[in-house]
Amino acid sequence: MESSSLAFLQRLLDTISPSGYEDEAARVIKEEAGRFADEVSVDVHGNVHVVVNRGAGPRVMLAGHMDEIGLQITHIDDDGFLRFTAIGGWDPQILQGQRVWIRTAAGRITGVVGKKAIHLLKEDARKKVVQIEDMWIDIGAAGREDAVARGVAVGDCAVIAQGFQMLGPDLAVARGMDNRCGAWVVIEAARLAARMGARAEIHAVATVQEEIGLRGAVTSAYRVQPVAAVAVDVTHATDYPGMKDERDRRGRIALGRGPVVARGPNINPRLFDLIMTAAGEAGVSVQVEAEPRGTGTDANAIQLARGGVAAGLISVPNRYMHTPVEVVSLADLEACAVLLAETLRRIDESTSFVPW
């Protein structure tokens, strides 16, 4: 991966941007897209719209959601401890004993998720998963007034305090790969497609609030009105211990083996064929994933926008989704961007997405 592209990815992953609080990620994307796009704007919902080839051929939308799961402060008690709730889908076991970063009006501060020590738990309590409502964040405050003086307020968001790190020459680990990966891919693909001379009018959208119901995809697709769209997200890798049942059910999805192309009712068959043709002609290795119903991705919302949109879905294999140690292959990320750009290069006014 080019050093500039890797730096862009790292800047994205460094942001604290849970659903509804995506402004940090949005600023990074606006700055990066401003280097090459014809137009960069933000709608009232917070989606970042990046346009390439304004006024050219058919309008094609790329969507990668830039939000992540997170936490929200709901109460500051008299002793200065912060109670919180989940933004998006959490496994409560992940949160115990973690350091967190809280976004406050005064800036980023560090806290820890507290839990009663195992020595003090009764035997039956040791066997139970602690629920989020029974946890708290400790910022070392002397009391409520001290916590407020440090800038903490009800409604502030927080994330696990984990950043980007390489695991060897290709695999990378970070919090928020779901789905800064997709946001990175759609911007990189738009940049590549412009260099390749794509003839479509490209709308690369970094969408908001996917983790709480595909909300940004609904509003941005309504605004763009594309004839076709490809969502880019992460999907579950099945190449690690404990995943045998998933491999038997869904197939082997492995890191380093290329983008995962979805096929099923959520996916327009002509667009699927076009993606697969582009992969073959460009020499991009892909993995195919069967999706027998609407997917839990932006592709689902986009397909149903207005009178219907020809939707596709390309995913990055991801280990340990919705944890602070999500692992992806940088080679897979690059290949996703290339595949998407190659697909865009093959779309013009003569391209039909009517399935039959």
Image (cartoon, helix red, strand yellow):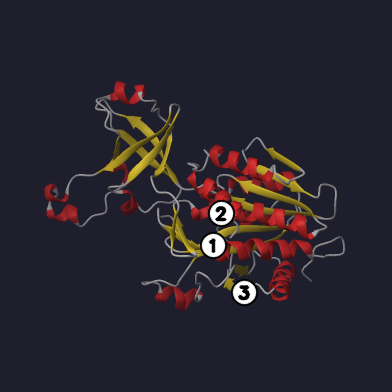
* Most foreground residue, 342 or 68: 342
Q: What residue type is labelled 1?
A: Leu
* Most foreground residue, 356 or 28: 28
Give residue 8's position: percent from left, percent from top. Answer: 58, 49
Residue 320 is drawn in which quadrant?
bottom left
For the point 69% across and 42% down, the residue is 34
For the point 27% across and 54% down, the residue is 129
For the point 48% across and 45% down, the residue is 14
Q: Which of marks 3 and 1 precedes in the sequence?
A: 3
Q: Quadrant of the C terminus?
A: bottom right
**Could you say whether the residue bearing mark 1 is in a helix, strand or loop?**
helix
Q: Which of marks 1 and 2 precedes in the sequence?
A: 2
Q: In this view, does 287 lie above or below 10?
A: below
Q: Which amino acid does label 2 sit on?
A: Leu
Label 3, label 2: how far apart the Cα atoms are: 21 Å
Q: Name the residue under label 1.
A: 330
Q: Which of marks 2 and 3 precedes in the sequence?
A: 2
Q: Name the residue under label 3.
A: 285
Label 1, label 3: how far apart the Cα atoms are: 14 Å
Q: In this view, does 96 lie above or below 263?
A: above
Q: Name the residue under label 2.
A: 6
Q: Can residue 135 be seen in this view?
A: no
Residue at the far right: name it: 350
Answer with left or right where residue 44 lies relative to residue 54: left
Q: In this view, does 187 lie above or below 343?
A: above
For the point 32% across and 38% down, the residue is 111
Residue at the far bottom: name it: 248
